Image (tube, rainbow, N blue to C red):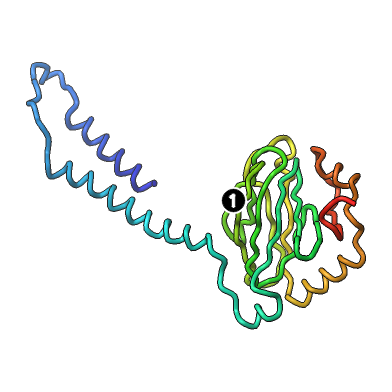
């Protein structure tokens, strides 16, 4: 962008300096010029080439991101081909539901490293945007919509996620951690959570859906209020 801006300003100041009106040439009338085919072709073709050069890799990568990443055979045998997590953007917190594991977490999410995770996004309040910068791109979470985003952590670690869409006074605090674990640690966490975490109650559900911030992350061993 800076290269383009500098080029434009160099030409601009050159033209207004060379062709400016001068007192000694007050009677000068510039000739009528229909155009210069050569230069008009050049400054039309170059932007077209630039746009095509940018569009081809952009379109290719965009279609590639719609599909889940490939997984190594050893990882697939241990954890399965992929994991689906439902994400709900509340005001101002993130709810993660594991349908297959019957687990719900709030403001944090655990995933197995090396496994593609299909995040299915929606919102119960204003439009939001789900974003884990270290793992991939950003996708919107909209009321009444079910949008998808594939993410994968190459190795265990903790990655910060956040809202990428202004949604009110609690927006700046709408953050969460993505904890990528080994396959064994993730399986152990699932088993422990199913056995020890409290069930999701209607009272807890109402508190989560109420606009406001939470003092700490929450974990439940069910995804529907008891």
In the rendering, at what x and y percent does residue 133 appear?
Answer: 61, 56
Observer-nearest residue: 163 or 11?
A: 163
Observer-nearest residue: 10 or 39?
A: 39
Q: Say left or right for 61 vs 205.
A: left
In the rendering, at what x and y percent does residue 108 appear?
Answer: 77, 57
Q: Say left or right for 121 vs 106.
A: left
**Total number of numbered labels?**
1
Q: Say left or right for 221 vs 112.
A: right
Observer-nearest residue: 209 or 137?
A: 209
Q: Residue at x 85, y 71 (%)?
A: 191
Quarter of image, res 219: bottom right
Q: Is residue 88 above or below residue 170?
A: below
Q: Is residue 221 above or below residue 190?
A: above
Secondary structure category for the residue under label 1 = strand
* Mark 1 crowdedness (10 Å alpha carbons): few <14, some 14-19, many ≥20: many
Q: Is residue 108 above or below residue 11?
A: below
In the rendering, at what x and y percent does residue 203 appear?
Answer: 91, 44
Quarter of image, res 168: top right
Q: Residue furthest bottom?
A: 74
Q: Residue furthest top?
A: 27
Quarter of image, res 7: top left
Q: Is residue 44 above or below residue 131?
A: above
Q: Residue at x 90, y 61 (%)?
A: 197
Q: Say left or right for 32 vs 191.
A: left
Residue named by callout 1:
139
Q: Residue at x 79, y 65 (%)?
A: 101
Observer-nearest residue: 131 or 89?
A: 89
């Amino acid at each position: 962008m800076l290269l383009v801006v500098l080029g434009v300003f160099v030409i601009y100041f050159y033209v207004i300096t060379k062709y400016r009106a001068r007192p000694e040439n007050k009677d000068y009338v510039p000739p009528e010029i229909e155009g210069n085919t050569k230069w008009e072709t050049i400054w039309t073709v170059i932007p077209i080439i630039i746009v095509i050069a940018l569009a081809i890799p952009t379109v290719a990568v965009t279609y590639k991101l719609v599909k889940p990443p490939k997984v190594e055979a050893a990882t697939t045998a241990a954890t399965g081909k992929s994991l689906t997590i439902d994400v709900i953007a509340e005001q101002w917190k993130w709810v993660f539901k594991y349908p297959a594991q019957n687990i719900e977490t709030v403001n944090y999410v655990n995933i197995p490293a090396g496994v593609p995770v299909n995040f299915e996004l929606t919102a119960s309040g204003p439009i939001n945007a789900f974003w884990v910068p270290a793992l991939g791109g950003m996708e919107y979470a909209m009321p009444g919509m079910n949008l998808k985003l594939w993410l994968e952590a190459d190795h265990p670690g903790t990655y910060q996620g956040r809202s990428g869409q202004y949604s009110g006074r609690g927006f700046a605090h709408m953050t969460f951690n993505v904890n990528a674990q080994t396959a064994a640690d993730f399986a152990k966490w699932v088993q422990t959570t199913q056995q020890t975490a409290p069930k999701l109650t209607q009272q807890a559900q109402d508190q989560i859906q109420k606009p406001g911030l939470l003092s700490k992350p929450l974990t439940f061993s069910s995804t529907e209020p008891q």
